[in-house]
């Protein structure tokens, strides 16, 4: 299956998405690539594989419900534009 520019215009109209004329060829190419991947999945031999509905009946492991700081403080604050000790620095808003 191949999607052309006319089909992309129609899909954009039906989806109520504004797409510039110049962006339509790139969008059509991207959709065609996605459809190519789907066609590759259709070629996989699935004989003998039972269909699944959900993640199965496996039980999830329980963990202790305890409050922690996440041990990520330094990594998070490394991206802060202004830092005051172990906290984010923010401008004063009350005089």
Image (cartoon, helix red, strand yellow):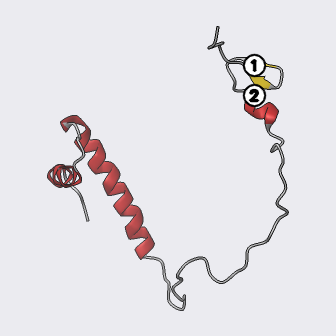
Question: Horizontal and vertical percent for residue 81?
Answer: 67, 19
Judge left or right: residue 4 versus residue 95. left
Q: What kind of element bears circle 2?
A: helix
Kindly identify the residue that appears in the image at 54 percent across and 92 percent down: 48
Kindly identify the residue that appears in the image at 70 percent across and 17 percent down: 82
Quarter of the image for residue 2 reads: bottom left
Judge left or right: residue 60 versus residue 53. right
Return the mark for residue 77.
Answer: 2
Compare marks 2 and 1 and give the one earlier in the sequence. Answer: 2
Q: What kind of element bears circle 1?
A: strand
Pick out the residue farthest to the front. Answer: 95
Judge left or right: residue 53 versus residue 72. left
Kindly identify the residue that appears in the image at 26 percent across and 65 percent down: 1
**Looking at the image, is 69 positioned above or below residue 7?**
above
Pick out the residue farthest to the top. Answer: 95
**Crowdedness near tag 1: few (<14), some (14–19) or many (≥20) residues, C-alpha within 10 Å:** few
Kindly identify the residue that appears in the image at 72 percent across and 18 percent down: 89
**Looking at the image, is 88 positioned above or below residue 29?**
above
Residues marked 2 and 1 touching at CB (< 8 Å): yes
Query: Considering depth in this image, is 83 or 17 the residue closer to the camera?
Result: 83
Question: Horizontal and vertical percent for residue 18?
Answer: 23, 41
Q: Mark 1 — residue?
A: 83
| Number of marks present in the image shown | 2
**Looking at the image, is 33 positioned above or below residue 87?**
below
Question: Horizontal and vertical percent for residue 49?
Answer: 54, 88
**Looking at the image, is 59 positioned above or below residue 22?**
below
Mark 2 vs mark 1, CA separation in Å: 7 Å
In the picture, which quadrant includes the C terminus?
top right
Question: Horizontal and vertical percent for residue 92?
Answer: 66, 12
């Amino acid at each position: 299956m191949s999607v052309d520019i006319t089909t992309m215009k129609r899909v954009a109209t039906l989806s109520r998405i504004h797409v510039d004329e110049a962006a339509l060829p790139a969008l059509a190419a991207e959709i065609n690539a996605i459809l190519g991947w789907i066609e590759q999945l259709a070629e996989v031999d699935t004989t003998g594989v039972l269909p699944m509905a959900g993640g199965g009946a496996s039980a999830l492991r329980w963990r202790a419900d305890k409050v922690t700081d996440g041990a990520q403080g330094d990594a998070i604050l490394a991206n802060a534009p202004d830092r005051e000790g172990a906290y984010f620095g923010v401008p004063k808003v009350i005089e």
